[in-house]
Amino acid sequence: MKIDMSPTAVTKRLRQVSALRNLCLSLARSSAGREVVQRHPTNKKVQRTSLALGR
């Protein structure tokens, strides 16, 4: 299987990754995200997300 490395395809993938990152961070900012932080404060992924949000 070949991966399309054309400039258009790479740009599209970068935009998709950016949109997904923004979506994940907005979900982490929600009340459900704050609840997860309170329930799992020692989880490395939760800590990394909290750090990215500036908490």
Image (cartoon, rainbow, N blue to C red):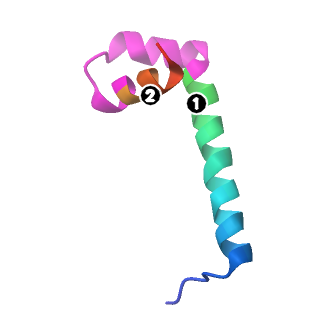
Local packing at callout 2 (Cα closer than 10 Å; few below 14, some 14-19, many 20+) is: some
Residue at the (64%, 64%) spot, across then down: 13
Please say if 17 is above or below 30.
below
Please say if 48 is above or below 54.
below
Please say if 55 is above or below 21.
above
Residue occupying the far left of the picture: 42
Location of mark 1 (residue)? 25
Mark 2 and mark 1: Cα distance apart in space: 7 Å
Q: Amino acid at mark 1?
A: Leu
Local packing at callout 1 (Cα closer than 10 Å; few below 14, some 14-19, many 20+) is: some
Residue occupying the far bottom of the picture: 1
**Element type where label 1 sits in the image:** helix
Q: Amino acid at mark 2?
A: Thr
Of 45 and 36, which appears nearest the observer? Answer: 45
Residue at the (38%, 29%) spot, across then down: 48
Residue occupying the far right of the picture: 8
Contact, CB < 8 Å: mark 2 with mark 1? yes
Please say if 1 is above or below 14.
below
Of 32 and 18, which appears nearest the observer? Answer: 18
Residue 54 percent across, percent down from the top left: 49, 17
Magenta-colored span: 29-47
Residue at the (32%, 18%) spot, across then down: 40
Residue 12 percent across, percent down from the top left: 71, 65
Location of mark 2 (residue)? 49
Say how many tags the image has.
2
Of 24 and 54, which appears nearest the observer? Answer: 54
Task: Point out the tag, 2 or 1, that comes first from the N-terminus.
Answer: 1
